[in-house]
Image: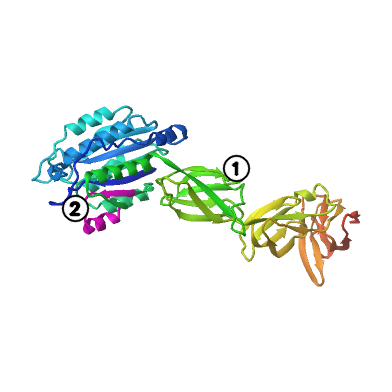
């Protein structure tokens, strides 16, 4: 199966009003034209192509009466109005699949589903022509139509693929639309379905609840309004701002990369660099309204907020705590070689490396306690270093001294750091090297070695020496 990346299932259910209800007459003046402002948003924004596949119910039950007319006629009129309003939307392609139109019942033919108009530019008149000629006659294979409809989209990993199912009832062929929806989601279907039910009772709500969001409309007028609201969500993006909150709960933190993941598939949808605009507020980002998001802010360590649902028609505020302070590690008086020393930063009590920071650089971290390991010789460790909001926590390392060693022949040995009666190897001598220039932190050391060619332990040599900050001296080996 092709890789279907961004597919939303929008289940639009046409069910006639119950006999005796106060049904309103179909009124062609209630236009479905999409707001031109939203259309301009589509033109301006750099968005992937949107493909909408309409799956249209032409089963025998569509001959039933609704608001004084046959349901299939009402559906055709609504579809034609909607298609006319979509004709001017750039970056949009439409296809049409129909079921229940090829074989009459009885007998029941659950394979009666067909792609009638494939995706192509400027095909709206062709879709309207096919709709006009449909005859309602067959059964309702919803699950099979959804499953086969997934193959109707071109193989394009970056398009937004929308499926809109127009039906007057539920599955009639022992299929399971909920199972099909879940299976397709596991293959990359990332957007939760919409269900707009006309006159559906509680039982039908229970049927569709496993498929997606349910909306109820009891008349064609209510359905028209619901359909327009759904299309606004399908075609339009919404604005949002991300408030990175400091310790006081104010949105002052910034300059962090933000990644928006699709909640269902985990796919990366957007990367933004958080910015405070000229008005001093977090700058606006543009997001697809159809997706539920998990947000990761790449601070150190990262912070995240899951299951973000955006509201259409408003400016969305996404807030999460991200208070940060600074860490600076210095070697006063150190030379250029010392500036290359790296420091491992870990969350207190956690062996996982969060960051590697160089000496004389300032790193930014989420407030809290950290363990620092400085890769000097020997290594220097600091535990429970507290990072406070906007405060620079400084650690100073004493300036190393430098020792020079020359051997006539390669040797095997160690430089051992002496701490009372405890000796720790801090530097291994190489059997392929004669000359060394090593910077060591102040302290007491021992040089223990023997010539690489010697085969007896008794030829081991031990030299003791002290290192002082800023000192430069040579260790005599003969």
Tell me where residue 145 appears, x and y as whole percent.
Answer: 24, 44
Q: Does 478 sit left or right of 347 as displayed?
A: right
Q: Does 421 sit left or right of 5 as displayed?
A: right
Q: Does 115 sit left or right of 139 as displayed?
A: right
Residue for badge 2:
174
Q: Can see residue 196? A: yes
Name the residue at 82% across, 67% down.
Answer: 418
Secondary structure at badge 2 equals loop
Q: Considering only vertical position in the picture, is 262 above or below 133?
A: below
State the quadrant of the C terminus.
bottom right
Which tag, 2 or 1, sits closer to the chain's start? 2
Q: Locate residue 104: give its quadrant.
A: top left
Task: Tell me, yes or no, whether the highlighted magenta stretch contains residue 17.
Answer: no
Q: Can see residue 4? A: no
Residue for badge 1:
277
State the quadrant of the N terminus.
top left
Residue range (magenta): 193-211
Mark 1: few, some, or many residues within 10 Å (few <14, many ≥20)?
few
Q: Tell which residue pokes out farthest to the bottom in this image.
A: 421
Task: Tell me, yes or no, whether the highlighted magenta stretch contains residue 200.
Answer: yes
Foreground residue among 15 and 443 = 15
Give the Cα distance between marks 2 and 1. 56 Å
Disc 2 versus disc 1: nearer the observer: 1
């Amino acid at each position: 199966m092709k890789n279907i990346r961004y597919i939303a299932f929008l289940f639009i259910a046409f069910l006639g009003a119950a006999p005796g209800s106060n049904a309103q007459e179909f009124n062609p003046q209630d236009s479905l034209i999409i707001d031109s402002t939203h259309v301009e948003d589509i033109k301006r924004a750099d968005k992937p192509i949107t493909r909408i596949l309409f799956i249209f119910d032409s089963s025998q039950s569509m001959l039933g009466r609704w608001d004084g007319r046959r349901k299939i006629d009402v559906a055709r009129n609504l579809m034609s109005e909607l298609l006319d309003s979509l004709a001017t939307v750039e970056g949009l392609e439409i296809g049409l699949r129909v079921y229940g139109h090829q074989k009459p019942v009885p007998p029941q033919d659950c394979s009666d589903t067909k792609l009638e108009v494939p995706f192509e530019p400027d095909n709206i008149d062709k879709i309207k022509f096919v709709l006009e000629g449909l005859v309602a006659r067959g059964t309702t294979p919803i699950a099979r139509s959804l499953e086969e409809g997934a193959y109707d989209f071109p193989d394009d990993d970056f398009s937004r693929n929308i499926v809109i199912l127009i039906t007057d009832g539920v599955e009639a062929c022992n299929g399971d639309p909920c199972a099909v929806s879940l299976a397709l989601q596991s293959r990359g279907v990332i957007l939760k379905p919409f269900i707009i039910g006309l006159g559906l009772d509680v039982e039908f709500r229970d049927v569709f609840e496993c498929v997606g969001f349910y909306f109820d409309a009891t008349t064609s007028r209510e359905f028209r309004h619901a359909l327009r609201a759904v299309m606004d969500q399908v075609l339009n993006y919404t604005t949002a701002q991300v408030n990175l909150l400091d310790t006081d709960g104010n949105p002052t933190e910034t300059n962090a990369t933000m990644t928006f993941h699709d909640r269902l598939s985990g796919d990366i949808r957007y990367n933004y660099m958080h910015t405070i605009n000229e008005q001093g507020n977090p700058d606006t980002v543009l997001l697809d309204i159809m997706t539920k998001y998990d947000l990761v802010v790449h601070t150190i360590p990262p912070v995240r907020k899951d299951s973000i649902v955006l509201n259409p028609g408003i400016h969305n505020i996404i807030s999460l705590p991200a208070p940060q302070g600074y860490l600076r590690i210095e070697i006063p008086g150190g030379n250029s070689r010392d500036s290359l020393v790296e420091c491992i930063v870990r969350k207190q009590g956690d062996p996982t490396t969060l960051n590697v920071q160089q000496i004389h650089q300032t790193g930014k971290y989420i407030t809290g306690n950290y363990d620092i390991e400085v890769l000097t010789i020997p290594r220097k460790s600091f535990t429970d270093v507290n990072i406070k909001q906007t405060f620079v926590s400084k650690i100073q390392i004493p300036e190393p001294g430098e020792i020079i060693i020359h051997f006539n022949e390669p040797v095997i040995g160690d430089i051992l750091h002496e701490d009372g009666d405890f000796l720790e190897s801090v530097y291994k001598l190489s059997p392929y090297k004669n000359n060394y220039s090593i910077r060591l932190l102040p302290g007491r050391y021992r040089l223990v070695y023997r010539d690489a060619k010697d085969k007896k332990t008794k030829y081991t040599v031990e030299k003791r020496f002290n290192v002082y900050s800023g000192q430069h001296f040579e260790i005599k080996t003969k």
